Amino acid sequence: MTPLEAEIRTIIAIDGPIPVDRYMQLCLGHPRHGYYVTRDPLGAAGDFVTAPEVSQMFGELIGAWAATAWQQMGSPPAVRLIEMGPGRGTLMADALRAARAMPEFHAALSAHMVETSPVLCALQEKTLAHTGAPIAWHHGIEEVREGPTIAIANEFVDALPINQFVKDHDGWHMRMVGIMDDELAFVAAPDPMLKQSETDATPVGAILERRHDRPVSLLARRLAQHGGAALIIDYGHMESGFGDTLQAVRGHKFTDPLVDPGEADLTAQVDFAAVAGWAQREGAVTQGPITQSEFLRRLGIEQRAARLKGSATPQQAADIDAALTRLTAPGQMGELFKALAIADPKLGPLPGFDT
């Protein structure tokens, strides 16, 4: 039994079953035993690999995207380049290197890393030590000074906690984590949060997910009020629907979300229609979503790969081809991952979203 499971069992013994969102918060962000607090989860030795770790092309294209967005904003003399959930800092390092191709943009920006993990903060500081840009760290986006903003959130939204509701004959019940047969188990709250209506034809047993929206809503409000653009890239679906998408990954394999809490990454698919709704509610506009494959191809990833291969060894060229496939192929990240832009209403179509 992990130390976190022992603590969760104590909480359940005292307070009763806990909602799924609280379980996720404890598993990922517990101050002593949380998954992100205690380790570097990335890479071959970790539990999963993100697109910036697959290839430098990903971060470089996003750096170019940010530079073009800055120009569309009117090239403000100071702009905050924010990354939410920045991992090891690889994406930001590659983006800042690409930004040097536009010296005016590089001179105008300050980088802001929204990160809660002390382990990852230390890795980011090391990765970004020689980028030549001013860099600050923050626990939440609300700590970043307001002003013109360009924000990146790659595989950030999927880790925001979700509430789950399960349909029964009398309505929708909140899904909870409790104890059954001395094991952590999913249970339903006894009373419905929303009673059955005559027009609700959803089958019994269906699961509805609702995600915490505060970080994205604050970001969208900031863009609407002070100008700028944000890029959300994550795995998920374009239209809202029903289904249990909560998953745990450990050692690059799926595992039971209720086994060994604190030792696996917990995420749920992103409902991009809902994310767009959050942004529009705050006065921002959205562009997309489109598949990651379409987005990267429009930004020129195939041309960038060809240029890199021009000076590469045969093995390096093969690695570039493999990375391109992983980032854009239908059976891999290319279609599972989607891209959505959130922007100040005064901006026109952003790179990758202009047809």
Image: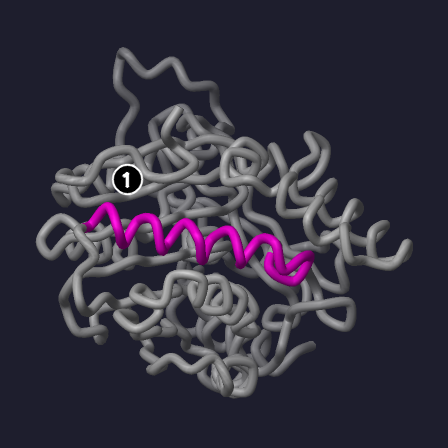
User: Residue 153: horizontal and vertical position, in percent?
Assistant: 41, 56
Q: Nearer the viewer, residue 247 or 22?
A: 247
Q: Residue at the spot x=44%, y=36% of the render?
A: 166
The amino acid sitting under disc 1 is: Met
> How was the colour assigned to the protein in this rendering?
one colour
Position in image of residue 111 (x %, y %): 35, 73
Residue indicated by mark 1:
193
Q: Nearer the viewer, residue 313 or 296?
A: 313
The residue at 86%/50% (across/down) is: 318
Question: Is residue 24 shown in magenta?
Answer: no
Q: Is residue 53 magenta?
A: yes
Q: Main secondary structure of the magenta part?
A: helix
- Residue 129 at x, y percent in the picture: 50, 87
Q: Residue furthest right?
A: 314
Q: Is residue 25 above or below residue 156?
A: below
Name the foreground residue: 209 vs 342: 342
Along the horizontal axis of the image, is 7 left or right of 113? Answer: right
Element under disc 1: loop
- Residue shown at 60% from the left, 63% from the top: 265
Residue 140 vertical position relative to residue 322 in the rendered view, above or below: below
Task: Please state the total of marks drawn on the protein image.
Answer: 1
Question: What is the magenta range?
Answer: 52-73
